[in-house]
Amino acid sequence: MSVHFSLSARVQSLKPSSTVAVSSRALELRRQGIDVISMSVGEPDFDTPPHVKAAAIAAIESGKTKYTAVSGIAELREAISAKFQRENGLSHAADAVTVTSGGKQALFNAFFALLNPGDEVLIPAPYWVSYPEMVAFTGAVPVPVPTTPESGFQLDPGVLEALVTPRTRMIVLNSPGNPTGAVFPPDVLEAVAGIAQRHNLMIVTDEMYEHLVYGAEHISIGTFAPNHTLTVNGASKAYAMTGWRIGYAGGPKAVIAAMNAIQSQSTSNASSVSQYAALAALEQHEETMRFIEMARTAYRERRDVIVAGLNALGLPTPTPHGAFYVMANTDRIDSNELEAARRLLDEARVAVVPGTDFGAPGQVRLSYATDMATIREVLARIEALVG
Ligand code: GLU
């Protein structure tokens, strides 16, 4: 006898993450022995630094393996509070900080803590695939704010403000940005902060790529509008700790308390062992900064090679000033980016993420968080395809 059940209306309209889907497909093809190079998932190719691993091993051996406070261990929240002050000029006491299972859970908790069905959320496009999906999952409405490749995907505060309506509740920012690599300059951030204050909007700023800037300066928008900003960050990109799943957020205490209530009813707390690892990354600051500097130098060299290579192959690609992604125009392969991505995978054996779910038609995203030899091989494969 078959069992009948129906999925919730909410989940039926949820699209699974395309960044995760493409990289899973690439992994599957590799398992089948097909020589696919994945430029899809945004994940540092560097290993987690040794001092971080050592702290995790010590945590396991000393029995730090139990539940922690919902918001994270006090030492980690103190270290994050100090980091916000030192690196971002933000004053968030430890009780205005929460630790989550990756940046994604911080965002998810924040959206559910702040949004009601029908609320509008302004999101500069191209955007990371998960922002509009998470926002829509709450019943709120994502409203893309267009930017152009010609401007290097720079945000125009005037364009953003023109989209504010009586239903607008929030602005989501991501600078340095995934997938564009755009870094918003201080005057743009100050203008957006002013818009948030004038219209009483909450800014949720995802600063996961803050250390990965090349000739640009990262500024936290929370310095301009502290009472209107929730700052989200995490260990994944800066410390090459994607699999450890440590994200965090700092902001108004009432928002953090609401996020903690959601977390208390879902995951309880981020992994205890991972929290001790992240604590070492923050406390052993100088060692960690040496690692970040090494990674940043490598990413910058790779960026220069991949941007020059793709442009030379007739795939127009703006030079990003942050993160580790490029957005390439794929008209030369096919005017439809889904078809272009399919041909890149099936014929060139290069996995990329089509721009569709990033709000970037006609483009694909390549992550260059991979070694230089692989980047050169990718360029050779694409050259063979476009001939
Ligand atoms: N943020 C990375 C990406 O865009 C990791 C995958 C994900 O969580 O989407 O590829």
Image: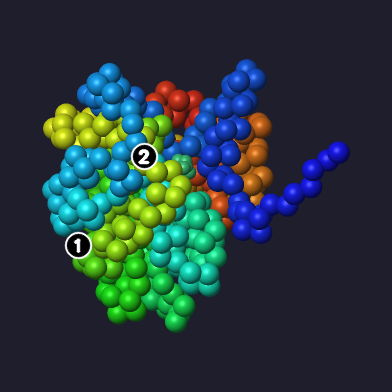
At 53% from the left and 27% from the top, the residue drawn is: 37
Between the residue at mark 2 and the residue at mark 1, the CA separation in whole angstroms equals 27 Å
Q: Position of residue 363 (x, y in %)?
A: 54, 50
Q: Where is residue 62 shown, x and y percent of the image?
A: 25, 21
Q: Is residue 255 visible?
A: yes
Sort mark 1 into few (<14), some (14-19) or many (20+) by Cα contacts within 10 Å. some
Dot 2, crowdedness within 10 Å: few (<14), some or many (≥20)?
many
The residue at the point 49 percent across, 25 percent down is 377
**Vertical order, 199 against 331 (above or below):** below
Identify residue type, mark 1.
Thr
x, y percent for residue 1? 86, 38
Residue with the mark numbered 2: 270
Q: Which residue is mark 1?
A: 223
Q: Is residue 183 left or right of residue 130?
A: left
Quarter of image, res 68: top left
Looking at the image, can residue 84 be seen?
Answer: no
Measured from the top left, where is residue 277 in percent x and y?
27, 30
Q: Quadrant of the C terminus?
A: top right
